[in-house]
Image: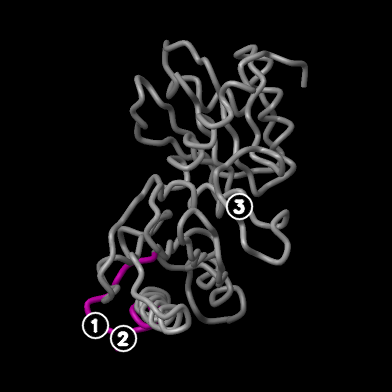
């Protein structure tokens, strides 16, 4: 069994690959004070009795990399594959500073596994628009995510309440909660449709649109541009990267 760990700013996504199949993920709230023991206590029941033969980690939270490496060594006697510069990905990053590209963006791009032109829209803590063509990452847009927008709205105003993120029945709200819900759902959907149009105009071609990330299933309902949903795209990409590096990763070295 291969364990995949994707550390995001809001959640840690843990998945396992058994007999080549990626199984549904476990989510843990991201907390930089987590120790290896605390993480293990939260994932041990999910992992079950299967022997762990490999661990791969992609993290945008540097402070959690060391506890995860300690987790791998202490509880599984394994040296994990940590996605960082120098790891083989099969992806050519055509940006000004490739070393600055986040692990989550790289995994999402690798997860496509296609030579066709794709625009990946990752609806996480931040919304990332990732243009991938022939295994090359050619450009990215980053905007505030739905949760960030909602927290900013509530935190910066005295009278607006904290609310659940749901799609209201109408775009124009007639009460405070529906007005806010409309802003962060229909607003994001309109942003997606508009940026897809602008990106396609800039690159001069139609793109295959892929939505992924925490609320992709929700926002998908009101995005007008044809698209597909790949909920586990980042974890799929991390698994492909693990496979590319498995030969070099086989021995258990000290952390």
Can the viewer see residue 104? yes
User: What residue is drawn where x is 58% and y is 29%?
Assistant: 245
Q: Quadrant of residue 30?
A: top right
Which residue lies under the disc numbered 1?
Answer: 170
* Residue 168 highlighted magenta (yes or no): yes
Q: Which one is nearer the viewer's eye here, 95 or 80?
A: 95
Picture coordinates of residue 67, whole percent (x, y)? 71, 30
Picture coordinates of residue 206, whole percent (x, y)? 34, 74
Residue stretch rendered in magenta on the structure? 165-182
Q: Quadrant of residue 207?
A: bottom left
Which residue lies under the disc numbered 2?
Answer: 173
Q: CA distance from mark 1 to mark 2?
A: 6 Å
Q: Which one is nearer the viewer's eye here, 86 or 214?
A: 86
Q: Main secondary structure of the magenta part?
A: loop
User: What residue is drawn where x is 52% and y is 81%?
Assistant: 159
* Residue 74 vertical position relative to residue 2 in the rendered view, above or below: above
User: What residue is drawn where x is 42% and y is 84%?
Assistant: 201
Which residue lies under the disc numbered 3?
Answer: 9
Q: CA distance from mark 2 to mark 3?
A: 31 Å
Picture coordinates of residue 202, whole percent (x, y)? 47, 82
Q: Residues within 10 Å of mark 3 (few under 14, many from 20)?
A: some
Picture coordinates of residue 164, whole percent (x, y)? 39, 64
Q: CA distance from mark 3 to mark 1?
A: 31 Å
Q: Residues within 10 Å of mark 1 (few under 14, many from 20)?
A: few
* Residue 243 vertical position relative to residue 136 in the rendered view, above or below: above
Q: Quadrant of residue 17?
A: top left
Query: Quick one: which residue is furthest to the right in this view?
Result: 254
Circle nearer the viewer, 2 or 3: 3
Chain-order first, disc 2 or disc 3: 3
């Amino acid at each position: 069994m291969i364990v995949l760990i994707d550390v995001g700013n809001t959640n840690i996504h843990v998945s396992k690959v058994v007999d080549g199949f990626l199984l549904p993920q476990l989510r843990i709230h991201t907390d930089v004070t987590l120790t290896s023991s605390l993480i293990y206590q939260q994932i041990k029941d999910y992992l079950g009795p299967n022997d762990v033969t490999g661990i791969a980690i992609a993290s945008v939270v540097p402070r959690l990399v060391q506890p995860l490496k300690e987790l791998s060594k202490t509880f599984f006697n394994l040296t994990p594959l940590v996605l960082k510069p120098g790891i083989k990905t099969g992806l050519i990053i055509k940006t000004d500073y490739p070393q600055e590209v986040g692990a989550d963006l790289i995994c999402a791009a690798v997860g496509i596994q296609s030579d066709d032109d794709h625009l990946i829209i990752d609806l996480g803590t931040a919304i990332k628009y990732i243009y991938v063509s022939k295994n090359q990452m050619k450009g990215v847009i980053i905007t505030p995510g739905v949760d960030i927008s909602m927290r900013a709205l509530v935190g910066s105003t005295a009278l607006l309440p904290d609310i659940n993120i749901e799609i209201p029945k109408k775009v124009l709200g007639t009460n405070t909660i529906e007005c806010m819900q409309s802003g962060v759902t229909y607003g994001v959907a309109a942003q997606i449709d508009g940026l897809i149009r602008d990106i396609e105009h800039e690159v001069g071609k139609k793109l295959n649109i892929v939505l992924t990330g925490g609320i992709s299933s929700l926002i998908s309902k009101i995005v007008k541009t044809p698209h597909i949903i790949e909920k586990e795209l980042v974890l799929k990409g991390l698994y492909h990267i693990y496979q590319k590096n498995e030969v070099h990763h086989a021995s258990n070295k000290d952390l």
